[in-house]
Amino acid sequence: MPALAALVALALAACGGGGTKQLIPSSHTVTSSADGAISASTPQAAQKLGFPTTATKNTTRVGGSDPVADAAGVALAVFPSAAPGTHPSAVAIAPTSDWQAAIAASVLMAPPIHAPVLLSGAGALPAATADALTTLAPTGSGAAGGAQVIRVGAVPQVKGKHSAAINGSDPYTLAAGIDRFVSAVSGQPSSDVMIASATNAAYAMPAAAWAAESGNPILFVGASGIPAATRQALLSHSKPHIYVLGPASVISDATLKALGKYGTVKRVSGNDPAANSVAFAIYRDPACKFGQPCAHVPNSFGWALRSPGHGYVLLNTARPLDAAAAAALSGSGDYGPGLVVQDASTLPKEVLNYFLDYATPGFTEEGPTAAVYNHAWVIGDTSAVSLAVQAEVDRLLEAVPQKGSGQ
């Protein structure tokens, strides 16, 4: 049989039997004909190649039916591990039982560790995670003491890999433990800290993408205020800039005021999860000057994405672990914020308007040129984000040819 050809950077297949997921490495192909190739004689060849479900011209889908499979697929998309220099130095394994810890673990993707997040329960590694870890073959992070695997919370040991463990008895202590680990590896604590709700995942999800890109840690507060673990973590940052993600209905003004004891506090929020994710995508501190182009600048906080030519990551709020699974995409390649949908079949109007206002290129000098770099990653199968929504996003990100005066 001839050698299998590489078709796409990433492919995921869900198998039956109790929800077990099988990872298809990027060096393999989906086969249908006698010689193992998809060819002119293959029925539904385009669909079997992954179009349009896996990819369109402006979108790529990581189509796992659960976050464990999505995390495996993302890790191999970011680190193909098929040639020297394409393996990660370390991989983080976060618990499926604790979405807060998984989201907080996204910061491990930032420099200097660059560890994508895989997911596991407390028992044996899921097949998708184990297969991905074998293919990724992490080389060992010098910054993290040579660790190949960073275990976060209640996840299994990995035989044959040099591991570092981050432990905690609850989401607050685990997030604080991740923060301590990152501060130690980086040599100093971050001057910026994000605060998210431990009780409302939909508003916390966008923090994962920024943590992976920036290295700013995520700490959590509860409905009753600031837990002791979070207070101690904030003290270790010595009066940081604190950014609270979510409206007062999610993190109260009283908690906001109490956080002021530990540093300067600003709120980034929208009235619903989709609006909240858009607010974070356009936010910058210091604020952008009115009437001037807005962009991220050194020592500023926030994506400040108010122009075409960027990456975007589309997530469903029903799957908070997908935020951690996808974080490596925001810490590499296209970069880009996490934007959320609440209904798989509908692009929220806030996200639609964001694309229309900032991502869809206009007939300007920079618009069509910048839009060449527009790209969206769609996370999850069509039960998370429908094919219709993916097609709509593809259209919104389309580069528009600039018309001359004679046209």
Image (cartoon, rainbow, N blue to C red):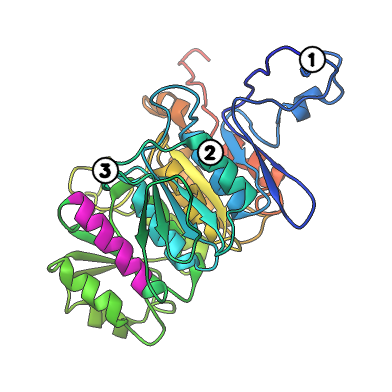
Residue 55, compared with residue 43, is above or below; it is below
Please report contact status of discs 2 and 1: CB closer than 8 Å, yes or no: no
**Local SS, label 2:** helix
Q: Identify which amino acid the numbered label 1 is placed on.
A: Ser
Q: Residues within 10 Å of mark 1 (few under 14, many from 20)?
A: some
Q: At 37% across and 72% down in the image, what residue appears?
A: 168
**Residue 174 within the magenta-colored segment of the rendering:** yes
For the residues marked 3 and 1, what is the alpha-carbon distance in whole angstroms? 44 Å
Q: Identify which amino acid the numbered label 3 is placed on.
A: Pro
The picture places residue 194, in percent across and down from the top left corner, at 31, 63
Extreme residue in the front direction: 160
Residue 64 visible in the displayed image:
yes
- Determine which of the numbered discs, if any, sits on residue 134 in the image: 2
Which residue does the numbered mark 1 point to in the structure image?
39
Q: Earlier in the sequence, mark 3 or mark 1?
A: 1
**Main secondary structure along the magenta-highlighted residues:** helix
Please report contact status of discs 3 and 1: CB closer than 8 Å, yes or no: no
